[in-house]
Amino acid sequence: MSTHPDQILKSNETVSFDENDRQVHRADNLKKTIPVLTLIALLCLILYPILASRENSFTLAIDRLEQRDEKAKLIKPSYVDVDRNNNPVNISAESAYREENEHTDYFFTNLIAEMSLPSGEGIEINAVRGALNTGTQIMDLGGEITILSEKGLLLRSTEATFIISDKIATGKNGVTGIASFGRFSANNFEANVGEEIITLNGNVKINFDPNKPLDLFGN
């Protein structure tokens, strides 16, 4: 069966040159646009979980704080200075804070204070807590306190005041210790750590070491 040429013409739609050009141009635009849109969608899928997780972790960190402390704390602080005799002073602690920015009093927890005597011997002070006035260089210590010098003087107490410039420790809450003459204990004490001069008051007990005779006349 043959087809008449007129029937072929009637079965095909006639498309103008301009319309065909527009369709080709539209196809080219789609070819350029689709990869860009695909890339944007892919970036959104990758970045969203990261940004969302950061926001959640920050929010949870704030929510988990049981108590908001308005005092700014210094973690692992270190105080470095010299006393009036130009001897070095170094205080480190687990943490420290002060009540107001303009205050000179710092409050430490688990502090270790290291300093030197004019003769060169060292002193180490350990305390559960302490307050340092950086202006006067006076420390008020509390908790378990240990004061040890390279000369051999050892003091143990639960409350003491230490004057850094003079290397003098005083306390009224009991003391036990070891000196060149032996062991001692008392209710109150004043100790010049540098000179190793100790004044004891109240319920004083001294156990003299026979292997360390006293030099009463300084010979």
Image (cartoon, rainbow, N blue to C red):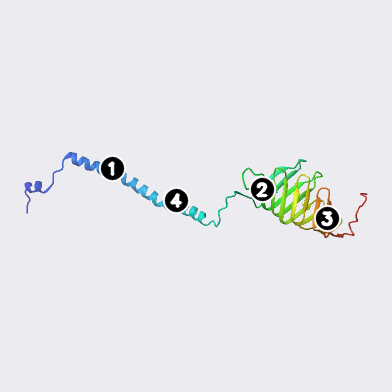
Q: Amino acid at mark 3?
A: Leu
Residues at marks 2 and 3, CA–CA distance in whole angstroms:
30 Å
Q: Is residue 203 above or below residue 40?
A: below
Q: Secondary structure under badge 2?
A: strand
Of badges 1 and 3, the one in the foreground is: 3
- Badge 1 local density, few (<14 within 10 Å), some, or many (20+)? few
Q: Quadrant of the N terminus?
A: bottom left
Res. 29 mark: 1
Residue 17, percent from left and from top: 17, 39
Alpha carbon of mark 2 to alpha carbon of mark 4: how far?
40 Å
User: Is there CB contact under 8 Å for labels 2 and 3?
Assistant: no
**Would residue 13 be found to the left or right of residue 104 on screen?**
left
Q: How far is the residue under mark 1 from the one under mark 3?
A: 97 Å
Circle 4 residues within 10 Å: few <14, some 14–19, many ≥20? few
Q: Nearer the viewer, mark 2 or mark 4?
A: 2
Q: Which residue is mark 3?
A: 200
45 with respect to 101 (left or right): left
Q: Is residue 2 left or right of residue 141?
A: left
Q: Earlier in the sequence, mark 2 or mark 4?
A: 4
Residue labelled with disc 4: 51
Identify the residue at image location x=78%, y=51%: 169
User: Disc 1 or disc 4, which is closer to the eye?
Assistant: 4
In this rendering, the label closer to the viewer, 4 or 3: 3
Give percent across and percent down for residue 200.
Answer: 83, 55
Earlier residue among tags 4 and 3: 4
- Which kind of residue does numbered mark 4 sit on? Leu
Closer-to-camera residue (186/64): 186
Q: Amino acid at mark 2?
A: Tyr
- The residue that mark 2 highlights is 106
